[in-house]
Amino acid sequence: MSRDDPHKSEASRAGARRLIEQTPKALAGLAAVSGVAYLAGSIYTKAYFSEFGASWILEEVPAATYFSQSWVPLLLMLYFGYLATTNLAAIGSQDDLTGNFQFKLSVVLVQYGSWFLLALLVTTPLLSTFGYITPALVLSIIGVAAILLLFSSALELVVVRYTSHPMGRPIDLSMVYIAFAVIAAGLYVVPAQLGMNWARVDKQPTSSLLPVYLRNDAERQYRLLFSVGERLYVFPARFEGAYPPVQGTTIANVSFVPPEQ
């Protein structure tokens, strides 16, 4: 056995101990961010249906049902779960993380990413207000990516500061606190803008929503807004005014092919 083997074995055991010690904290954090993810999904869903003037649907449908069909909370939970496991692995495999490229990149992203995200949070609502739907939608999607990236970078600094050395690393966390504050604002603004502008796209005659026909109104094309079990919520493909007349119906009253002329 080489002279370095005992040292490697001891380092591996120390890494394993740190990994075990941090696992409960990571699980608690994962539970917390799961709640945040569902909150963001709720904001997105309410903004989406409100743009149709159909917030009443949320009173008829259980929360778990429409959350399960929203990609926002699923995306956030999967990302946060991945983030927690990779950070734990990094803690367990290295004694000093401050010298690697990932840590240096995280420092840069925290320093400048907060201001970038803040600019997005100001610009996106302005574009929505003046009717620039597509640019606002694009910026909202970029905002989702910016929140995830900024959060992972800020979390990296916190992890290194408090867990990779018993006495803590001499890392200034003031920019991390600013980043978390901007992220908190972004978790409301970005889902709200994303839901509102996505709904505006879906209201257009060129919408990609599934076209359907009601048996008691076969001459008129409708769009399928939402469905749960045998219950469907539809609206006319062409309508007047800001809000389409959304109505609930049963699947037995719906045809998915145009009526024969």
Image (cartoon, rainbow, N blue to C red):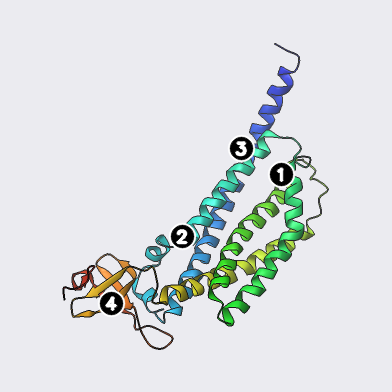
Q: Which mark is residue 20?
A: 3
- Residue 148 picture quarter: bottom right
Which of disc 2 and disc 1 is earlier in sequence? 2
Q: What amino acid type is highlighted by mark number 2? A: Trp
Q: Give percent across and percent down for residue 64.
A: 39, 63
Distance of label 1 from label 2 (alpha carbons): 28 Å
Between marks 2 and 3, how big is the CA–CA gap? 32 Å
Using the image, tell me which numbered label, if any, was put on residue 102.
Answer: 1
Res. 161 visible in picture: no
Q: Secondary structure at mark 4?
A: strand
Quadrant, the N terminus: top right
What is the count of numbered marks? 4
The residue pinned by badge 4 equals: 221
Label 1: element kind: helix
The alpha-carbon separation of the residues under discs 2 and 4 comes to 27 Å
Dot in front, 3 or 1: 1
The residue type indicated by label 1 comes to: Gln
Q: Which residue is mark 2?
A: 71
Q: Label 4 amino acid?
A: Gln
Q: Point out the tag, 2 or 4, that comes first from the N-terminus.
A: 2
Does the CB distance between marks 3 and 1 fall below 8 Å?
A: no
Q: Position of residue 195 (x, y in %)?
A: 49, 71
Residue at x 50% of width, y 75% of height: 196
Instruction: Judge left or right: residue 27 versus residue 123.
Output: left
Q: Nearer the viewer, mark 3 or mark 4?
A: 4
CB under 8 Å between discs 2 and 3: no
